[in-house]
Amino acid sequence: MKVIKVLLAITFVTIIIVSCLGEKKKNESALANSPQEKLYAVFDDSNNLVRPKDYRSWVFMGTASTPKSQDPNVIFPDFQNVYVDPVSFTYWKIHGEWREGTIIVKELLRQGDTVSSVGHGFFQGAHFEVAASVKDSKRFPTMHNGWNYFGFADFKKLKLNETSIPLGAQCAGCHNNNAIDGDVFYQYYPVMLAAKGYGDGNPENENTRPGLVEDYQHYKAIKEYIKNMKTQK
């Protein structure tokens, strides 16, 4: 009888141990595949960025409109739709800075119609370019804060390339001299600006809006703009 009890006890303990080990393995597997660790920027063996896939399902930051008809010398005509990978956007919202591995995609479009049922204006036409910026300090130690830049359109062959070499200084100079924090032009994208360091929740759920003030004027100085946003909350 005692032998049976001992055997039952050993069996019970064994089941618990196996169960715990299985749970541990399951948790470790979940941790390894945690979305917090997911990286969306993929590079080949030559350090070229593979053209991002499915980025239109990422977090949409907004559109910059720089019609060539208004400025013949504009650098990026005519529209730029900007997307950020979802994990990096969450990190930005919580920490107010971009994580290592962040990828931002800029998709360029031609100008479309200038007249619609709501009035005269500038409306998007056809897509023509995909560009991206990636923060990777280990991969690009000489670049400011690890940011490097990429473009995929081959205007001679009229198609998008599968990969892009790092463009480096070709783009970095403009970003370093004009972006508000030296890398990302988030001063031109209110969704990105409102989310910076917001923390838990989402700013779009607030019942206030900085632009609701009757005499609203856009602040070109970003520090004043952020100060004004905080005042309105």
Image: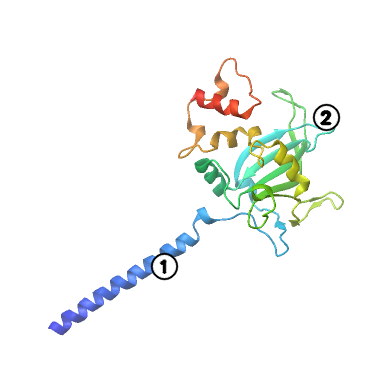
Which one is in front in this view, the residue at disc 1 or the one at disc 2?
Answer: 1
Image vertical order of residue 127 relative to residue 111, above or below: below
Which residue is at the front of the view, 188 or 137?
137
Residue linked to disc 2: 69
Q: Residue at x 53, y 56 (%)?
A: 37
* Category of crowding for the residue at label 2, using alpha-carbon neighbours closer than 10 angstroms: few (below 14), some (14–19), many (at least 20): few
Residue linked to disc 1: 25
- Residue most extreme to the top: 215
Q: Is residue 185 left or right of residue 160?
A: left
Question: Could you tell me how far apart the alpha carbons at marks 1 and 2 are, in whole angstroms?
Answer: 60 Å
- Residue most extreme to the front: 142
Residue 67, quarter of picture: top right
**Which kind of residue does numbered mark 1 sit on?**
Lys
Residue 123, quarter of picture: top right
Secondary-structure class at tag 2: loop
Q: Position of residue 144 (x, y in %)?
A: 67, 47
Q: Position of residue 138 (x, y in %)?
A: 63, 57
Task: State how the image is colored.
Answer: rainbow
